[in-house]
Image (cartoon, rainbow, N blue to C red):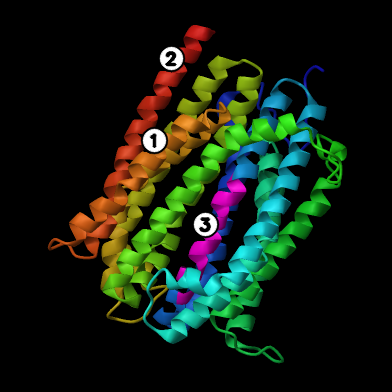
Amino acid sequence: MGKIKQKTRNVDLLNGPIFTSLTSLAVPIMATALVQMAYNLTDMAWIGLVGSGAVASVGTGGMYTWLSQGVVMFAKMGGQVKVAHSLGEGNREEAARYATGAIQLGIMLALCYSLIAVIFARPLIGFFGLTSPEIIEDAVGYMRITCGCIIFMYLNVILTGILTATGDSKTSFLANVTGLVANMILDPVMIFGVGPFPAMGAEGAAVATVTAQFVVTLVFIAAVRRDKVIFDKVHILSKTPRSHFKNMARIGLPAAVQELIYCLISMSMTRLVAGWGDAGVAVQRVGSQIESISWMTAEGFGAAVNSFIGQNYGARKYGRVKKGYLTAVKSMVVWGFLCSLLLVVLPGPIFSLFIHEAEVIPLGIDYLRVLGYSQLFMCIELTTVGAFSGLGKTLPCSILSILFTSARLPIAMALSSTFLGINGIWWAFTVSSIAKGLIFFISYMVILKKLERQA
């Protein structure tokens, strides 16, 4: 069908300077990741004023929101990669069929997940072994609200992936900025109570989050209704061929299993952390949100790499595939080094912005400093995951990730039983991240050599 004529918001990924094409797509995605980080940190900052107990409630209930991201990855990754491949081949109609199937699959998965989360919230929260009845009740309430309305987050994630595959990352940025503004306004109102709104604490944070996600969904719907690349051909009620679901499953299932196992291991690690008290859970929750300044940005850059490589791989432009990956890695090495420096040098001032109890802050300082050493390698890992996915090779990527992430639990159990105590758990995260970053990079370079021989 020839070359695809791009709209103003759609970056041409198949032609022109690689660095310019890649960064034009990546910068709005990275900005979106930073907006998402601000979104999460806003919650933590307001909840931190309530106390570390409320932070523990939100952190525990939020683990199942994180788990849900593994489920939606099944639809998001398969849809994004196949849309990119189809556009690279010059077939917009095929891309629209894959986009339709991804959205249909996402809606079905959201409804199933919401039902399970609402019905079984109490026993699922009980898994973490929290000791305070008040914290447990707040965690159950938070989970039922956020997971019960998970459909908005699912639609946002899938639409972000599809738009990124078309070369449009600006719409996602604008939608998420709108959601951030809504969340910043709603958080203090719902958490502390203003005017006719009662103080709801942790549940108020959940209501603010879900409402903001709904606002983001409305912005996405308004934007895609004007899209003429593929969304003018997307019809949600139309039947998607079974072969398309199979193709998306082949790519999306390994990525989903990887994300689910990763989250389940992290939940087991949280249960291990709970052995040091509810304060340890609060430290892990806040620390991981602060750490997200590096991993969410790298994950966003990886999404840009996914689409760039996906389109060029579909067009069989293997030289651009290699140069695009190496350009991305160089950029993320610089970003990862800066993030490592920030967490290692300034852990105290950063952590004390979110939790104010004097006895908890030293635990948070240790967390940030230990995790700081791994940020550069984690950025390389996440960028390479996006590159693997762009080729449609999610299975080897998932195997490597599952293998080394699974090693965290026994390493954490061993190290935490020594003089390191709870810091041994943080070192398990760091050691595994360093190993994954190095091995992912080496593995992808091997794949690139095979592509060169094919060319």
Instruction: Give, as a three-letter code, the residue at label 3.
Output: Leu
Would you call the spot at circle 2 few (<14 residues within 10 Å), some (14-19), or many (20 or more)?
few
Position of 331 relative to 201 (above/below): above
Gap in angstroms between the C-alphas marked 2 and 1: 19 Å
Position of 218 relative to 389 (above/below): below
Residue pointed to by mark 2: 449
Quarter residue 215 falls in: bottom right
Residue pointed to by mark 1: 400
Residue 67: numbered disc = 3
Front residue (pair 271, 183): 271
| Mark 2 or mark 3, whichever is nearer to me | 3
Residue interval drawn in magenta: 57-73
Q: Are marks 2 and 3 in contact (CB under 8 Å)?
A: no
Q: Would you say residue 349 sits in the magenta stretch?
A: no
Among the two numbered marks 2 and 3 on one chain, the one whose residue lies closer to the N terminus: 3
Would you call the spot at circle 1 few (<14 residues within 10 Å), some (14-19), or many (20 or more)?
some
317 horizontally vs 451: left or right: right
